[in-house]
Image: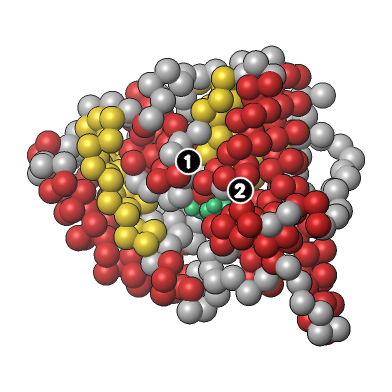
């Protein structure tokens, strides 16, 4: 089954054709990051306007790269939640138009579930059940994936996502938007032991995260140094920040995998491109006898191949939509309410 996926939840307009949820036939991404960089972050209205301009040629290119026409496509999958509402609406409306025009199924896909599915495109042996660690600009979550369309949250961030922490600290260090990748680059040159960053302590669910304390500490530290006219070694600070984020993600993931008896862990989301997070989680999984999966860096960020991949499994589970489909800015993943497994 060939699915054309569409993604427009933030600042990437993307379309892709994927066969049977596993084989990428084409994958086109038009990033607006350079333009939003001028403003230090994503400007929602600008993002919507650019999606509107880009969506048609991006979809056409995904089809022509696949050497296909709309006739060769069996269904349309689209990100409908969560994200910037005006941005989501562009992809949703376009996908609805395609489905109406062709009479083919329309499949709604939750963006965060789509991130997890990026691993299916490169790891043929990855099948549920496994433990997903989804870390992006808007989400940080450990979820049980008992089957392809159920995501049971084990722990999630109570405040900022890890990507938000990377980006806000990066901005305070003077790096351009989106800052995570610049922190990663600077961290390669830095010494993490040069800074002692606070470790977040929390009551309640041990698998929950909190990154706002770390973010506030780093931003205040830089602000105070600036007021005193003191220079800060941003390579060292980046290395310490990255190490602390990687440590907390790794510790909680391994603890959850052990407590819930999982043998496979799959990392995904924009922050899964981070070299420190990749290395730390891979090493920890190896040491604990867990199979570890992660997408190549090219599939960590927002793309439509992952939406088409999850769309395939949604379709098999009977999750389709009609013309009433609407965009939703904020929505939990499919599955149970947040549970505390301890
Ligand atoms: O998944 P994504 O593209 O969009 C959301 O769904 O949020 O994730 C974007 C986030 C941004 O915060 C970006 O800075 C972060 O992923 N990111 C990174 C790296 N590459 C992207 N963070 C740290 N290190 C990286 N190499
Ligand atoms: Zn994303």
Please tell me whether residue 284 is drawn above or below residue 104 in the rendered image.
above
Crowding around mark 2 (Cα neighbors within 10 Å: few <14, some 14 to 19, many 20+) is: many
Q: Quadrant of residue 194?
A: bottom right
Percent coordinates x, y for residue 92 in the rendering: 34, 53
- Camera-side residue of 169 and 262: 169
Q: Which residue is drawn at 86% across and 37% down?
A: 204
Please tell me whether residue 4 is drawn above or below residue 92 in the rendered image.
above
Percent coordinates x, y for residue 76 in the rendering: 27, 41
The answer to whether the beta carbon of the residue marked 1 is less than 8 Å from any atom of ligand 2 is yes
Query: Which numbered disc flags the more N-terminal residue, 2 or 1?
Result: 1
Residue under numbered circle 2? 139
Kind of element beneath mark 1: helix
Residue under numbered circle 1? 115
Crowding around mark 1 (Cα neighbors within 10 Å: few <14, some 14 to 19, many 20+) is: many
Question: On the rendered structure, is 115 left or right of 222?
Answer: left
The answer to whether mark 2 and mark 1 are in CB contact below 8 A is yes
Q: Which quarter of the rendered picture does the N terminus lie within?
A: top left
Kind of element beneath mark 2: loop
Percent coordinates x, y for residue 147 in the rendering: 50, 20
């Amino acid at each position: 089954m060939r699915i054309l996926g569409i993604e427009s939840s933030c600042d990437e307009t993307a379309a892709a054709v994927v066969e049977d949820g596993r084989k990428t036939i084409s994958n086109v991404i038009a990033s607006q990051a350079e333009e939003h960089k001028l403003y230090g972050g994503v400007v929602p209205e600008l993002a919507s306007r650019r999606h509107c301009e880009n969506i048609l040629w991006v979809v056409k290119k995904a089809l022509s790269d696949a050497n296909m026409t709309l006739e060769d496509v069996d269904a349309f999958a689209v990100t409908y939640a969560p994200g910037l509402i005006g941005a989501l609406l562009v992809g949703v409306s376009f996908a609805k138009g395609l489905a109406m025009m062709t009479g083919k199924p329309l499949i709604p896909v939750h963006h965060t579930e789509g991130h997890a599915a990026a691993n299916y495109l490169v790891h043929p042996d990855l099948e549920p059940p496994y433990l997903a660690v989804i870390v992006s600009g808007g989400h940080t979550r450990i979820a049980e994936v008992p089957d392809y369309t159920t995501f049971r949250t084990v722990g999630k961030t109570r405040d900022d996502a890890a990507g938000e922490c990377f980006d806000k600290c990066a901005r305070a260090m003077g790096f351009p938007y989106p800052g995570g990748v610049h922190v990663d680059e600077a961290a390669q040159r830095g010494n993490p032991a040069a800074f002692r960053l606070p470790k977040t302590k929390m009551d309640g669910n041990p698998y929950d995260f909190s990154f706002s304390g770390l973010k506030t500490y780093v931003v205040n530290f830089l602000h105070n140094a600036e007021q005193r006219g003191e220079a800060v070694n941003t390579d060292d600070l980046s290395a310490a920040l990255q190490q602390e984020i990687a440590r907390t993600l790794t510790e909680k993931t391994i603890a959850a995998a052990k407590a819930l008896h999982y043998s496979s862990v799959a990392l995904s989301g924009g922050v899964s491109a981070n070299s420190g997070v990749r290395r730390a989680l891979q090493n920890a999984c190896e040491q604990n006898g867990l199979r570890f999966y992660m997408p190549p860096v090219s599939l960590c960020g927002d793309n439509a191949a992952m939406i088409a991949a999850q769309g395939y499994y949604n379709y098999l589970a009977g999750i389709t939509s009609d013309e009433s489909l609407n965009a939703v800015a904020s929505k939990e993943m499919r599955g149970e309410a947040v549970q505390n497994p301890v």
